Image (spheres, helix red, strand yellow):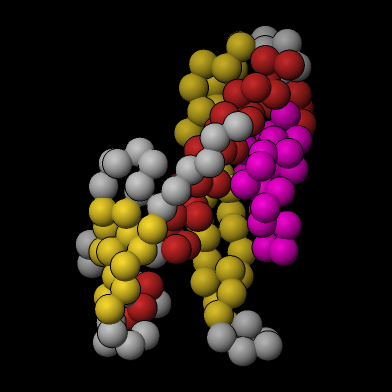
């Protein structure tokens, strides 16, 4: 299996510094990061580790749910997955990922709402990114659309 790579170049202190995150394997882009933007309500054109985790989690979850819908005898038509990753204080000091909320709205032929919900829960437990984030509380809001 392949290994994917990203790298970050950082200059300066935590509070005054800035970095550039490069998606090295895909060569899709380089994105600015800074600690003040990471902890602000407005990202102002900067990404953050939390946003990158959210992107990874939503993509991984969508793939896993698509596979599980098919395994359950359904045909996935469309999945809209949002991952909200929250940053918060760590009781041991510093910061931690305080929680992740996965929201999925799906269209799938051949499954009822209960079967869709089961596939959605199973995908939450079995997608590789969810497995990597077992120390974070992950909640799920899943609904089959008509």
Residue 98 drawn above or below residue 62: below
Q: What percent of the width, then of the height, locates residue 113?
A: 70, 25
Q: What percent of the width, then of the height, locates residue 84?
A: 50, 56
Residue 47 drawn above or below residue 120: below
Which part of the image, by quadrant, shows the N terminus?
top right
Q: Residue at x 65, y 22 (%)?
A: 67
- Regarding residue 42, the answer to whether it shows in the image is no
Horizontally, is 62 left or right of 11 in the view? right
| Residue 126 on the magenta span | yes
For the residue pair 50 and 113, the one nearer the viewer reads as: 50
When asked about the image quadrant of residue 28, the answer is top left
Q: Residue at x 73, y 39 (%)?
A: 126
Which part of the image, by quadrant, shows the C terminus?
top right
- Regarding residue 90, the answer to whether it shows in the image is yes
Horizontally, is 125 left or right of 22 in the view? right
Q: Residue at x 51, y 16 (%)?
A: 77
- Magenta range: 119-146
When asked about the image quadrant of residue 127, the answer is top right
| Residue 101 on the magenta span | no
- Which residue in the rendered view is the most extreme toward the left? 45
Number of marks in picture: 0
Residue 73 drawn above or below residue 44: above
Q: What percent of the width, then of the height, locates residue 10?
A: 32, 73
When asked about the image quadrant of residue 75, the answer is top right
């Amino acid at each position: 299996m392949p290994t994917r790579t990203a790298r970050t170049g950082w200059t300066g202190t935590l509070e005054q510094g800035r970095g550039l995150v490069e998606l090295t394997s895909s060569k899709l882009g380089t994105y600015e990061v800074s600690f003040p933007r990471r902890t602000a309500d407005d990202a102002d054109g900067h990404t953050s580790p939390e946003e990158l985790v959210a992107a990874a989690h939503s993509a991984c979850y969508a793939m896993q749910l698509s596979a599980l819908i098919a395994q359950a005898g359904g045909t996935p038509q469309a999945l809209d997955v949002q991952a909200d990753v929250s940053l918060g204080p760590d009781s041991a000091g510093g910061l931690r990922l305080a929680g992740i909320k996965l929201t999925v709205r799906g269209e799938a032929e051949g499954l009822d709402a209960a079967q869709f919900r089961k596939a959605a829960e199973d995908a939450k437990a079995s997608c590789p990114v969810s497995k990597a984030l077992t120390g974070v509380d992950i909640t799920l809001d899943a609904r089959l659309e008509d």
